[in-house]
Amino acid sequence: MQTVIGAIDAGTGGVRFVLFDREAREIASYHVPVELRYPQPGWVEQDPSAIISAARHAVNEGVSRAGVELEEIAAIGIANQRETIVGWERETGRPVYPAIVWQDRRTAPRCAALSATPLGDQIVERTGLTIDPYFSATKIAWLLEHVPGLAGRAARGNVLFGTVDAWLLWSLAGAHLTDATNACRTLLYDLRATEYAPELLDAFGVPRASLPEVRPSLSVFGRTRSDLLGGSVSIAGVLGDQQAALLGHAACTPGQAKVTWGTGAFLLAHTGDTPVRSAHRLLSTIAYASAGGGPRYALEGSVFCAGAALTWLRDGLGVLSDADRSDAMAWSVSSSEGLCFVPALSGLGAPHWDPAARGALLGITAGTRREHVVRAALEGIAFQTVEVMRAMESDLGAAFPELRVDGGVSQSDFLCQFTSDLLGVPVVRAAVAETTALGAAFAAGWTVGVWDGPMDLRRLARSGRRFEPSLTLPERDALLLRWRDAVGRAKAWRSE
């Protein structure tokens, strides 16, 4: 009988279930998309029930396609889109409002007001985050203020809140739990004390009883309900998706870094058992936590729009017939002809943190073609990545010898090569395309003893193609100077 590990990757665009064997080879995968809704400018929502339906469908279909028996699945891990908030009734499990997605900007005015108070500095110091609509607390506060009767019901313990991992655990295993990597993204969690801070709960008006219990990332969270797979399987290992991708690269020692190019772009570097305070408005976060070893920390730069820019070019403008064609279109022209695309479609994240920034396409001429626009969009992803990486190197006092990349958009050879050119160091693409799912599987397999910690993971995390830099230093500097000029023009575009 073989041993397999499952991974639920509940991302922004949908839910994927992947099964891996003991050598971390993918044996089956199934993806179910989940629609994003934009009811008002700056608002981004999803149907919580659709997330659960997608997870159930993906798991059942993936297991069926693999042809494995239930008893062969040692455990299932979870990786999830972070900061997105779901509220539901304790008794019925019915959602009380659509999920407010991490990209949502509706709470920008409250964040701006809070940042201007002494409490704002305390929140930043204790959480390691910045005050931005990206994070969960102001989303929960908005729900409590705008959904009729919700505040009273939550105070009486009748309504529960949680990030997507907690919503999955409640729906699939009947437990109101979360892990440290997700809890630390709420603006309610003390990064060093590793617990919800009463002062922060009071500041946002969030009842403690409405929040999930925080468990170590590498632990058993429960067992699936029998109606999922016709039996019970351990859910062992839960990580926010970016931390899962970091573990998927086996980045378990300080100084290792990766970027995931998906809907957004997220650069994380492992910093060991001590959080690093950034001088460049990067985030201190928990990389993972184990029951015996405590938390391991990471420094993070979060970029809100990466692959989402390509999706917009496809669905919003019709410039792309298929996002997979972006690479060929970018290579088909020798340059972007001075065109610069700042993809601030949901504001700017690190290192700017400007929710009032808006997307900008600068340098348009009568000779601009759709190929130039697509190339400029991919270049914009690379420019944002370089900005964050340089800030991170400054905070850590050391340069990275290479950058490891993963995520759907990392399949773009153009993006990998252009990023290497701008950085002046190699870019190494992960051999396993589903690195986030692999990290969730690593967490589950490590927890239940299929794999024996970092040594095993380093052996199993294989590298793929390596891209070497080709631009001269003056050429890099000229491109980066144009980018900084473009970003300056896109910032503070709208008064929220």
Image (spheres, rainbow, N blue to C red):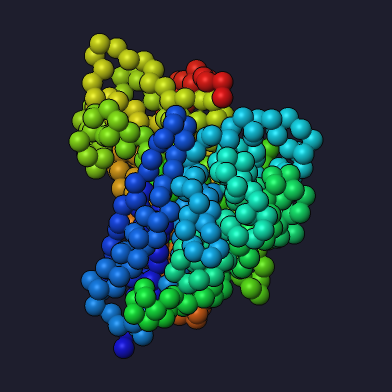
Asked whether, in this view, residue 64 is left or right of residue 184, the answer is left
Residue 2 versus residue 163 in the image, above or below: below
**Which residue sits at x=47%, y=77%?**
223
Is residue 385 visible from the viewing direction of this image? no
Quadrant position of residue 134: top right
111 relative to 405 in the view: left or right: right
Check the picture and name the quadrant holding the C terminus: top right
* Residue at x 40%, y 36% (from the top left corner): 38
Q: Position of residue 345 (x, y in %)?
A: 43, 30
Residue at position x 30%, y 58% in the image: 31
Q: Where's residue 215, x and y in %?
A: 61, 68
Q: Which residue lies furthest to the front in this view?
A: 149
In the picture as drawn, the residue positioned furthest to the top comes out as 366
Say which of 139 and 240 sits in front: 139
- Residue 450 placement (x, y as % from top left): 45, 80
Above or below — where is 222 with respect to 328?
below
107 or 315: which is nearer to us?
107
Image location (x, y in percent) of residue 164? 49, 56
Q: Residue at x 35, y 18 (%)?
A: 338
Residue 19 horizontal side relative to residue 247, left or right: left
Which quarter of the figure has residue 44? top left
Q: In this view, does 121 lie above or below 300?
A: above
- Does any portion of residue 228 appear in the rendered image? yes
Towards the viewer: 146 or 446? 146
